[in-house]
Image (cartoon, rainbow, N blue to C red):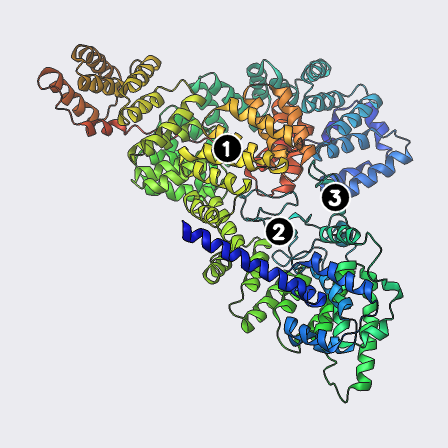
Amino acid sequence: MDNGLVSYKNTEPMMQVFNVQEKSDWIIYNRYIQRDLELCKLLIDQELRNTKDNNEFAFYILGLIYREEGKIKNSYWCFDRYYALNPLCVEGVKQIARSCLLLGRNDEARKMYLEAEKMCREPDTKVYYNLGELDKSKEYFHRTIQLSRNQDAYEKLASIFAIENNFKNATNILISASKLFPFSTNISVDLGLLYMKQRNYDQAFNVLGNTLCQDPENPKALLTLAAEMQRNCGYDEALAKYTKAVTDLSECSETWNNIGMCFFGKHKYVAAISCLKRAIYLHPFNWIALYNLGLVHIYTRQYVSAFVFLSTSAKLNPNHAGTFMLIGLALNHMNDTKNAEKAYRKSIELNSENPEALINLTILEVNQGKIKEAEKNFHAFQEACLSCGAIDKEIIELGKQVSDAINGQPQSLDENEDEKKLESDEPCYAEVE
Amino acid sequence: MVDLVLKASDNYFLTMDDTKVIASLDTFYSACMDLRKHNYDRCIESCTIILSKNPYDQVSENYFNHYIIATGNYYKFCLIKTQAAWALKMRALTEQLSIDDIEAEEEGIADSYFNSDAIAENARVGTSLRTAQDTSNQRPRTVGGRPLSGIVRPSTSSAGGNNLQLALKTPRTVGSSRPLTSQTARNIRLGTASMVSQIDGPFINISRLNFPKYASDKQLSKLLFNYIYYQQNDIRNVRVYEWLFNVLALDFAVEATKFCNFEDPWWKVQLGKCYVMLGLLRDGEAQFRSALQHGPNIEVFLRLSRLFIRLDQPLSSLDICQKAMSWFPHEVTLLIEIARIFEGLNNIPMSVKYYRDILELDATDMESIACIGLHHFYSDQPEVALRYYRRLLQMGLYNAELFNNLGLCSFYAQQFDVVTACFENALRLALDDNAADVWYNISHVAIGFGDLDIAEHSLHLTLSLNSSHGAALNNLAVLQWRKNNVSQAESLLNSAIAAEDHLYEPHYNRALLAQEEGDHQTSYAMVKKSLSIYPNHYNSRDILNELKKYFSSL
């Protein structure tokens, strides 16, 4: 950590000579370094009384202490006094600017930092780092990294790249950061998540596994690994990881959602429902958990409940095609074919290459005897199957049956069949802030 | 049809005869009968008539016989002397107002703040009701910061914690504009009741009573004591009975050779009651304990356990109850007491276990059913909770709270068809103070159905009924936030914090909002408060860590 003494050296040589005369500064500094903050405050109080508020160093340390206690306004005042006593020192300007930043007065902060930049003789990494938090962040963070090894700057820069979908740069930065800070779990977890996003699962596994070696209870790493295991149908391992994480995150809706979907994967529907319900209790606007709950209810043949949950999910997020497909399915089971058809069409409207919605619509139309329309939709389904990569085998089988039905014997389709292509459950992969 | 009519007319004649017979009877006898029928007003009336005819009513042999038949042997002794009508009227006046005062205890702020009996300021976790560990964060908490119970009892509204500031600040809601004072609720009611009965002057002028004379009368003294204790509600005068007891003891000491039973445990219990009322808890304890040496008595055990709860020693209280259980193994009131203490200690599983035991002994105990139902509801078993609440409905309970709970249970148990009906019933039966909560729950149901407009409307209705409903303000803020009305959300959160600061949610939300706006100081202050209310909140700790990082970097 950078603190008073360092700034002290930055000041003018003249001032330094002057300051040596102030005897008690080193005591205050000592106390501050030893984190004996209460005593430090008392000493500062005494010192300020003795010098009639003329000790800038005392003000500086007092400002730092106030900031750590969360009293930003007081600390702002202290740095202001420091600046008034010593207007040539960059440190004062920097700290005032930092206080402005913490108080949310961003414009003021930027002006101060730019001023500080002018005052500096040599480029100062802190100034660039803080400027980076305001605007033109990429540029400034880059300069920060060039000037010093600042872990936060690396993380920030990587996250900016990630937001811009520039995953390559982001991973590069994180890799170099993890070489510089090999024991930082934050960086390695971020790196693991990035690999996950790029679907580079093996790398992600390696990185996250290493993280867990260092910090076996890192909730982010645990959750990500568990989610990955869950994706590969390793439900028991995933559950073990989740139970480790849940002690810490018992109020995290996404975790409960994933646990629920683990149980669902193991065909334990009651447990799944109660976990998903807890997820919704904790976060009523979690549309993914609502969607999953609807899905589980369709499996347990409680179509009314399924409809209620799915429609809630659709109200909260009306842009998810899968929700409408499931609504259609629930309605179909309740013999409301008219609305079921509407729901399928809505789903297809949202995502025209959704093979599940298309095949379901086709089946519905075959059952209603509208063979022509069914044929049209079936072609769309075949195209969708070709265009998107991984498709469930059951859907393809179903497609074959449907094509048989369209070509030869209509009405022979088993109603129960269309339940099978629901396997596309979507556990949401929690990334805790 | 004819038969029925005939029968009815027979009955009519009979009752005519009955009233005629009673009217023809002696007034004193009819007064006695009225007392037995709990017909206190008429009894008092008759007594007043007798007393106005003959102020120093001497009991004749004739009356005495009637009275023995009427009330049994208990008053034999008393009535041989004098003043039967006077005693009877006193008894009627007392019984009119006497209530079961074992449970009716509410500690006022003054009591809790100036409490010199508390053993430890910062008691170890699990040994005090005030430091009860918060294990079940799923359960909402009351204004006092205690977890919600299934039933409203006198003690549930007490402002737990001996912090005067907290007590003064928190309960000042629309419902009650003033905090709990040292005057207990029961005392207020009784006080007003005695005022009413004193329209034509007090029945007995206590200050003029010749205490030694009445105290020496073994039977009459008890009646007089009860009269003063319940009817006059003047504890300071009852205090005199300490002295009276001494006089009694003295008198009996003289006559002890004949009557050796001057060590009457009844008097000890009464003395203990008076001491507890006066706040002299340790003296009260001594009296109760010495009363127990005469033999086990449920009432005394209960009073002793209550006393330890007032001393904030729930474990001793549990000890007492367990000892009592060894004497009276199937006593429901003792089991209820134990269950309540465990609930107060936040040991919900034990509490539920005892409530289940109660239900095995007494299947109609509403408190147990309600508490077990609540427990199931908050442990994700709304279906089971629904069964318990339906049982309550079967037992004839018919109020807004029950229908509200039924509605919520059936909503979470996915019985969607009855939800609306239940809430409609709840709203129909609700009074102003609980209608706010019903609307609040309706807003939750609306959120559950994804209809955020209705949710917002019902939250507005909640606030129109109870403008300081913290949870409603908080939820409304969240809904506004979702709509990106950040400034409105901020002001709503501020008022939620001002209204009820025992909730951590508004604090956390405010911190999150402030952090998004870049106002780190407010965020820091709020997150600190949130963590002081709920120390294990992961998200709050996350924000705090982030802020600390901010503050420590240069």
The answer to which image quadrant residue B449 occupies is top left
Q: Quadrant of the N terminus of chain A?
A: top right
Q: Which mark is residue B207?
A: none
Q: Chain of mark 3?
A: B
Q: Amino acid at mark 3?
A: Pro
Q: Chain of mark 1?
A: B
Mark 3–mark 1 Cα distance, whole angstroms, equals 33 Å
**Same chain check for tags 3 and 2:** yes
Secondary structure of the residue carrying tag 3 is: loop
Q: Do tag 1 and tag 2 residues touch (Cβ < 8 Å)?
A: no
Q: Amino acid at mark 1?
A: Glu
The answer to which image quadrant residue A305 occupies is top left
Q: Residues within 10 Å of mark 1 (few under 14, many from 20)?
A: some
Q: Residues within 10 Å of mark 3 (few under 14, many from 20)?
A: some
Secondary structure of the residue carrying tag 2 is: loop
* Residue at x 63% of width, y 61% of height: B20
Residue at the disc numbered 1: B424
Q: Which mark is residue B153?
A: 2
Of B313 and A399, which appears nearest the observer? B313
